[in-house]
């Protein structure tokens, strides 16, 4: 199983879509506080179509609390600032895929702490800023699942 970790997500429909994605793929969803919304918001429920009951969602006070509770063997920092393409990585079971908030991405201090070797990006045109968060999670999560031969999936 893989962990999708959203660091301080801001937009409820994105988190709802990612919740639905995790429910359909078997990934665990971790939400790092502070959140830019309440989990009971109507826009989150609409986007997630009440998938909250079908996915393991854990909330954590901060990134350190997530690490201490879950002990992920490897954390891939998904950022436009990375040099490595997400497709060049050999994913392993229990890897964590870490994504930053929509408006600002992962903080520089956290990226420095994890190190350049753990940063991955989705290749894009040089003139573009970034993909929508839920689209980026889908691209990277499904590549990891493909490499792992879609565990527990039909």
Image (spheres, grey):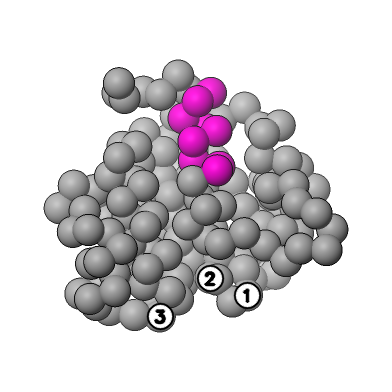
Q: Main secondary structure of the magenta part?
A: helix
Give the crowd class for mark 3: few <14, some 14-19, many >=20 residues within 10 Å: few
Nearer-the-camera pick, 88 or 16: 16
The residue located at (73%, 41%) in the rendering is: 85
Dot 1 lies on which element? loop
Q: Quadrant of the C terminus?
A: top left
Specify whether 68 is left or right of 50. right
- Pick whichever of labels 3 and 1 is earlier in the sequence: 3
Specify whether 23 is left or right of 106. left
Query: Measured from the top left, where is residue 120 in percent x and y?
Result: 68, 47
- Res 101 label: 2
Specify whether 81 is left or right of 136. right
- Res 69 label: none
- Residue 24 visible: yes
Range of the magenta residues? 139-147
Determine if the magenta segment contains residue 140: yes
């Amino acid at each position: 199983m893989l962990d999708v970790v959203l660091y301080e997500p801001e937009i409820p429909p994105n988190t709802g879509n990612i919740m639905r994605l995790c429910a359909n793929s078997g990934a665990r969803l971790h939400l790092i506080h502070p959140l830019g919304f309440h989990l009971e918001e109507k826009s989150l429920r609409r986007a997630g179509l009440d998938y909250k009951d079908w996915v393991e969602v854990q909330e954590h006070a901060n990134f350190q609390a997530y690490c201490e509770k879950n002990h992920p063997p490897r954390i891939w920092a998904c950022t436009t600032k990375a040099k490595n393409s997400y497709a060049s990585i050999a994913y392993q079971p229990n890897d964590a895929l870490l994504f930053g908030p929509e408006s600002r991405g992962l903080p520089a201090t956290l990226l420095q702490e994890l190190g350049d070797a753990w940063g991955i990006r989705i290749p894009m045109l040089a003139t573009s800023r970034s993909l929508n968060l839920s689209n980026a999670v889908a691209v990277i999560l499904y590549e990891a699942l493909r490499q792992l031969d879609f565990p527990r999936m039909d």
